[in-house]
Image: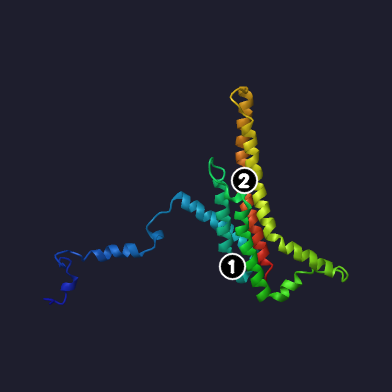
Amino acid sequence: MMTNLFSIFDPTSSVFSLSLNWISSLLSIFILPYNFWLIPSRYNMLWIKLSQFIYKEFKILINKNAWGSGIMFTSMFMFIMINNFMGLFPYIFTSTSHMSFNLTLSLPLWISLMIFGWFKFYNNMFAHMIPMNTPFILMPFMVIVESISNIIRPLTLAVRLTANMIAGHLLITLISSTASPSMNIILISMILTAQMLLLVLESTVAIIQAYVFSILSTLYSSEIK
């Protein structure tokens, strides 16, 4: 029972012999999002800036009615790039150098785009089969060519990524296998220099191939409209 109407504002009052009146001030801190009271690290800031830059690049190519898919392609770019970089470390499995992994990424995406396009925009899908200003005689032939090129798209995406990741790793392995303790110090220095240059090149290829895979997927999705 309250002895005074203003006793609820008394900070010295307690419940169960515990002074819990000031806890309400701490609860507001936990309710606020982390961005308001936690400073992001340089790693998080770099990751956010990179994600925003890639998203802006993809948003230009995506249909205005499907801007939400830019998040999906940005996540795909990040996922492939991380896996490509992980393969550059010693004794780590390179998952993107295997067709089974790359087909798992490209085939479901292509199938979902085709199902959505043929059920939603079947007139435009038929129109893409014949390029503009195609002679009437070549129309049946162009339909066959466009159908084949459309069917092999997921395979070309997977093969391109697999081949580029395998080629660089094999070249580094072949150069390192030629080195031996009995070799001249000059030759060993040349081999180490070549390996470091190839490692820098492979780091660039890891980013480029992730970008190519994602940008081609974005272009394929932009055709469905």
Query: In which image quadrant can residue 150 be found?
Result: bottom right
Instruction: Tell me residue 218's x, y (percent).
Output: 64, 62
Residue at position x 72%, y 76% in the image: 123
Instruction: Tell me residue 209's x, y (percent).
Output: 64, 51
Query: In which image quadrant can residue 131 be found?
Result: bottom right
In this rendering, does residue 171 appear at all?
yes
Mark 1–mark 2 Cα distance, whole angstroms, equals 28 Å
149 is higher (above) or lower (below) than 184: below
Query: In which image quadrant can residue 138 be found?
Result: bottom right
In this rendering, does residue 133 appear at all?
no
Q: Quadrant of the C terminus?
A: bottom right
Residue at position x 14%, y 65% in the image: 17
Three-letter code, disc 2: Thr
Please tell me the numbered disc located at residue 204. Answer: 2
Instruction: Tell me residue 199's x, y (percent).
Output: 60, 39
Q: Is mark 2 on a helix, strand or loop?
A: helix
Please tell me the numbered disc located at residue 141. Answer: none
Hey, which residue is sitting farthest right in the picture? Answer: 137
Q: In front here: 57 or 16?
A: 16
Residue at position x 66%, y 75% in the image: 119
Q: In this view, does 71 lie to the left or right of 217?
A: left
Q: Mark 1 points at which residue?
A: 67
Three-letter code, disc 1: Trp
118 is higher (above) or lower (below) than 20: below
38 is higher (above) or lower (below) than 182: below
